[in-house]
Amino acid sequence: MPTLHSQHEELSAAIDELALIDHHCHSLFSTPPTDQQVEDHLTESPDARAARTTTFDSNLGLATLRWAGPLLGLDPPVSREAYLEARRSIAPRDLISKSLAAAGVSDLLVDTGFHPDDLVDLDELSRLSPARVHEIARIETRAEELLSTTDSPEQFLQAWPELLANLDPSVVGLKSVAAYRCGLDLAGTHPSRAEVLFALGHQLQQRPLRLNDPTVISYLVITAIEITRLPVQFHIGIGDPDVRLATGHPGHLQNLIEFALRLETPICLLHCYPYHREAALLAHDYPNVYLDLGLALNFVGPRASEILSETLELAPYAKLLYSSDAFGLAELNYLGALQFRRSLTDQLTSLLKDAYLTLDTAIRLAKLMGRETAKTVYRLSVTEAR
């Protein structure tokens, strides 16, 4: 009779070997960041004073020192100073290759909507990584780029559907940052043409151009769902101060979720903390809703297992996806994968301990959450090999 210890060891090994699909991340620095830039990417706050001391004095900072430190060749315990010194000694592209190999991902779905000049492009990211690279197109960014080249709202309304119908085949999903622009209370039906034209006229008067009118955002998202039928990701909850928490609640999306359900289009809720329980309820209730804990698992660090457990109180196991939300710092790809694997192992081991499931079932559920659901949702033709 296998002991709990032996089952835990076998489960842990299976999860460690699982080739994850990272269904939401960003590109990474191509040039060496300053020490301050490294610290800036360990917080969502744009104001360094928010940490009061250093961003390494946080759960994400502590997790970075504990787990990414050894990736840089350091033995724990690792100090902030030693970590930054070791990081400066590694070329950015070498760190990208090292981090992505250690993360053990087979596929990266990369949001290209926020692309400073110092990030590697998708072609180079693909060359540096053992993973296949796919694109997630950001709806608001594509619309702003198009609107800046059109002469009138009428011309935009003609060109936007054409752009959506002719997306590059590398685009496997879409993302909306409505939470940063107008909140998530989007329409569940088409705004009228007159309403959209009127709102676009006002938007065109803004400089710099930043689409943030709820009528415009609703039109963009609804049209994208109708034409592409691609999964649409929504940023939920945790973020910088641009996100208004009150209007970033996932419950506001119910009308749009029901519209997408009629068209059999998946809606993927990203990050979700502190609304992870509410997002879990939406995934529980609606066939087309999926969720991840994205950057939340990295930010909560040692508390990752508890947050995952709270999410799975209601979310069906087959509705959870993995993402790192890594941006800029390559070690966040590795840290995200490690935190996900550790918390998933903890969750499933607790169920093994109380005989809620067998080892075979635990491994099957781990595969669902780590890769198989994402493979289905994004219609990816991928293999298990790393």
Image (cartoon, helix red, strand yellow):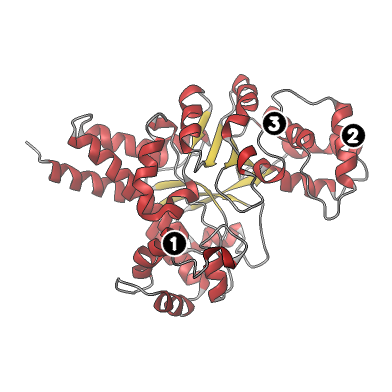
Amino acid identity at mark 1: Ser
Q: CA distance from mark 3 to mark 2?
A: 17 Å
Which marked residue is nearer to the observer: mark 1 or mark 3? Answer: 1
Pick the quarter of the image with the N terminus: top left
CB of mark 1 within 8 Å of CB of mark 3?
A: no
Q: Position of residue 56 (x, y in %)?
A: 45, 67
Q: Position of residue 371 (x, y in %)?
A: 41, 41
Q: Earlier in the sequence, mark 1 or mark 3?
A: 1
Viewer-closest of 102 and 190: 190
In this rendering, position of residue 97 left or right of residue 229 = left
For label 2, the SS is helix
Q: Which residue is mark 2?
A: 198
Question: From the viewer's perspective, is 58 left or right of 136?
Answer: left
Up-down relation of residue 158 to residue 115 (above or below): above
Residue in the image at 59% along x and 39% along y: 233
Q: Which residue appears at 67% of the width and 51% of the height?
A: 242
Horizontal side of 185 relative to 384 (left or right) equals right
Q: Nearer the viewer, residue 331 or 264?
A: 331
Q: Position of residue 270 (x, y in %)?
A: 53, 42
Q: Name the residue type under label 2.
A: Phe
Residue bearing the label numbered 3? 186
Location of residue 232 by image quarter: top right
Residue 119 can be seen in this image: yes
**Residue identifier under label 1:** 58
Under circle 1, the secondary element is: loop
Is 205 drawn above or below residue 372 in the view shown? below
SS for dot 3 = loop
Does any portion of residue 385 appear in the rendered image? no
